[in-house]
Image: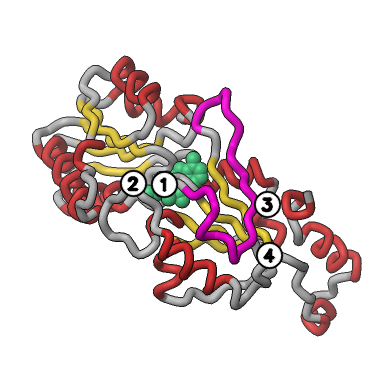
Amino acid sequence: MARPGSLWVVGTGIQLMGQVTLETESALRDATKVLYVVTDPVTKGWLADLNPSAEDLIDLYGEGKQRIETYHQMVDRILECVRAGEDVCAAFYGHPGVFVYPGHEAVRRAREEGYRAGMLPGVSAEDCLFADLGIDPGATGCQSFEATDFLVYRRRFDEHVPLVLWQISCIGQLTHETETSIRGLELLAAHLTQAYSAEHEAIVYEAARYPITAPLMARVAVADLPRAPVSGISTLVVLPARPALADRTMVEQLGLSDSYVLRKAQRAIPETARA
Ligand SMILES: C[S@@+](CC[C@H](N)C(=O)[O-])C[C@H]1O[C@@H](n2cnc3c(N)ncnc32)[C@H](O)[C@@H]1O
């Protein structure tokens, strides 16, 4: 039998409370202890109204402090509450399992220690990006990488498919910094210009965090990335320059018609790239 104490890890979405799902709202309301990492004051106030036990973990971040140390402290605090027999709901902005090490780690450790634990999906920055930039991953696929990982491991990618790069403001930085790493952007620009032309356009994207503001979609030549308006919430999207060529043998072996290939070519470049 599971021990007393449980954990739900949930996401509050990117834009205020409008992107909180009904199941997440109910998990937050029913918890005996809420812990959260969200960035805007309105969501903080909403969480405190919904559940008076709500505790902010954001202060565990510190300028120049190793991010991994902060993440372990978050997990430790979450587990401390679970072990005390609380029904804990830990909320992170966006999707709680997308680029949220402490979200996954807290669930893993709670289960390992014999507690009931799970994660509920939320609306991530990439979900907003698909909507705002008109990208359908079903059209050609979509590649998504953490920017430092992308460079360090020379991840293989297909320049005919949209390329999404996360955490472009802190490339190579393992500590929490408010300043964007220009050196990191220089190295990213140099790497991308090996696959694309220097003038090839990318989009620095920031989903709107408030219903009254518009998303940022700043077009920038890949070579100019070090001078682009990049902040801690920017995600980079490199759109394909041209459709891939179909493998004619495979088209025939699968019994597909030319109209399939034509339709795919028409959908290969999102409208945003043409605008
Ligand atoms: C630690 S991750 C958190 C991701 C979040 N859990 C999610 O589901 O979107 C931080 C990165 O998410 C992306 N991000 C966060 N907020 C964003 C926004 N408003 N618009 C675009 N990208 C965002 C950026 O790439 C940023 O470096």
CB of mark 1 near ligand 1 (< 8 Å)? yes
Q: How many marks?
A: 4
Q: Using the image as rendered, state which of residue 271 and residue 250 is in the foreground.
A: 271
Instruction: Inspect the image, locate mark 3, and give the three-letter code of the amino acid beneath it.
Output: Asp
Q: Using the image as rendered, state which of residue 44 and residue 8 is in the foreground.
A: 44
Q: Nearer the viewer, mark 2 or mark 1?
A: 2
Highlighted magenta segment, given as a residue range? 209-230
Residue designated by label 2: 178
With 22 as the anchor, is 83 left or right in this view?
A: left
Residue designated by label 1: 232
Instruction: Inspect the image, locate mark 2, and give the three-letter code of the amino acid beneath it.
Output: Thr
The answer to which quarter of the image holds residue 78 is: top left
Residue 112 locus on image (x, y percent): 18, 54
Of label 2 and label 1, which has the lower sequence position?
2
Residue designated by label 4: 200
Of label 1 and label 4, which has the lower sequence position?
4
Farthest-out residue, right:
258
Q: CA distance from mark 1 to mark 4?
A: 23 Å
Q: Is residue 111 visible?
A: no
Residue 42 locus on image (x, y percent): 39, 22
The answer to which quarter of the image holds residue 213 is: top right
With 266 as the anchor, is 64 left or right in this view?
A: left
Residue designated by label 3: 136
Q: CA distance from mark 3 to mark 2?
A: 32 Å
Q: Nearer the viewer, mark 3 or mark 1?
A: 1
With 156 as the anchor, is 61 left or right in this view?
A: left
Is label 2 in contact with label 1 (beta carbons under 8 Å)? yes
